[in-house]
Image (spheres, rainbow, N blue to C red):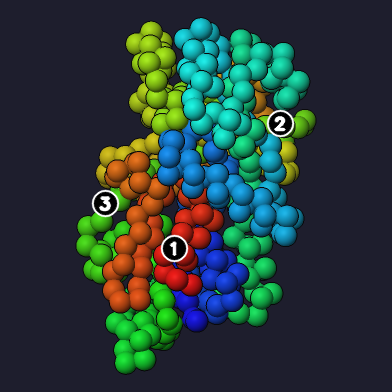
Amino acid sequence: MRVIVVGAGVVGTMHAWQAVERGHEVVQIEREAEARGASLRNFGQIWVSGRAGGEELETALRARELWEGIGARIPELGFRAIGSLTPVRNDLELAVAEAAVARADAAARGYKLVTADEARAINPALRGEFVAALHCERDAAVEPRTAQLVLRKALLASGRYTFLPGREVREVIESGKDGRSGVRDDHGEVHTADAVVLCTGAWLGGLVREIAGDIPVRRVRLQMAQTDPLGEPLTTSVADADSFRYYPAYASEALDALDAGQAQEPVAAAHRMQLLMVQRRDGGLTIGDTHEYEHPFAFDTLEDPYEHLTRVIEGFLGRPLPTIRRRWAGVYAQCTDTSRVVHRQQVRDGVWLVTGPGGRGMTCSPAIAETTADELGW
């Protein structure tokens, strides 16, 4: 069987991985020289802790299992089973963490409520003031800027994989008498296969609109940054209580009480912020993030969110944040019904569109691709 994958972000690359693993030949087409979208502009977190119960959590847990297996085969991926800590600073925040630990699926997530001293034993870099922390053992991390590169290197070694960069797909070709579908790129070349999977990320206009119409997927813009090396290990990912407001796993009466009794800081509320922080293998910290949903998006990055993140982080670390050396904005595609893990749609005979995982793309992509492969009978 021959499979064409359009798009070389993490969702597309994981579809290519699934096809090659199942013995098929794959041609992956990417309009840039390398992917430059949300797959690189993220934390690299395999984030189980905040996922909604049910399908979303099951997808994240399966993806976590797949990431760990791939990481064992490809050490350069940088898979690290580091877990996460969410320090809480008062009784209202603590009550939300207690409600999370009381969930029926808490054990599957690896939830545990730890004291401040226990949190510092797990992550000694947290020398600041807080009263307790929510620990999630199932969270993990990979290196987002290089993940697709090392996966592609392994795919190329299979002998059944071809990567065609710098080619934008302009047309989808209906399946012919031989049952094969195909695409035509902007070089005028036609590529045919038994199945075509369009993993176009936040590219929702142009060809996607022509063949799929207006799909129930929106674009979301974010701001993030990376610092100079911390100078010591940050042994877990770190979040703050604003993440309780963002992730569906924390919905509870305790969260309602937090919202009523502790207003989110104005800059955080204005930019729909949470703190997430992960240490890169070079020692630097990836920090973020903001969320912008209204179009047209701003084209500049604003300083207030970074100042807010700096204050929160320094409160947890009990020391100055290293100098920010990179700032960036990114855009990802998210299902408008955020309870849906992904938008998967057959748009032509033999042609499927897979997009819209939102901020779950890095976490869930291996399981999303596995489900596609199972449903298509690869």
Q: Quadrant of residue 191?
A: bottom left
Residue lying furthest bottom in this view?
177
Name the kind of residue labelled 2 in the image.
Leu
Q: Nearer the viewer, mark 1 or mark 2?
A: 1
Q: Nearer the N terminus, badge 3 or badge 1?
A: 3
Relative to the observer, which residue lies in front, 238 or 205? 238
Q: Nearer the viewer, mark 3 or mark 1?
A: 1
Tell me the element at label 1: helix
Relative to the observer, which residue lies in front, 179 or 214? 179
Q: What residue did someone put label 2 on?
A: 234
**Residue in the image at 49% along x and 81% along y:** 2
C-alpha gap between disc 1 and disc 2: 36 Å
**Residue in the image at 41% along x and 65% along y:** 375
Tell me the element at label 2: loop
C-alpha gap between disc 3 and disc 2: 38 Å
Relative to the observer, which residue lies in front, 79 or 114? 114
In this picture, residue 319 sits left or right of residue 287: right
- Residue 110, x across and y down, in percent: 61, 31
Q: Residues within 10 Å of mark 1 (few under 14, many from 20)?
A: some
**Residue in the image at 56% along x and 15% along y:** 88
- Residue 243, x across and y down, in percent: 48, 27
Q: What residue did someone put label 3 on?
A: 216
In this picture, residue 42 sits left or right of residue 142: left
Q: What residue did someone put label 1 on?
A: 372
Name the kind of residue labelled 1 in the image.
Thr
Residues at circles 3 and 2 in contact by the CB criterion of under 8 Å:
no
Tell me the element at label 3: loop
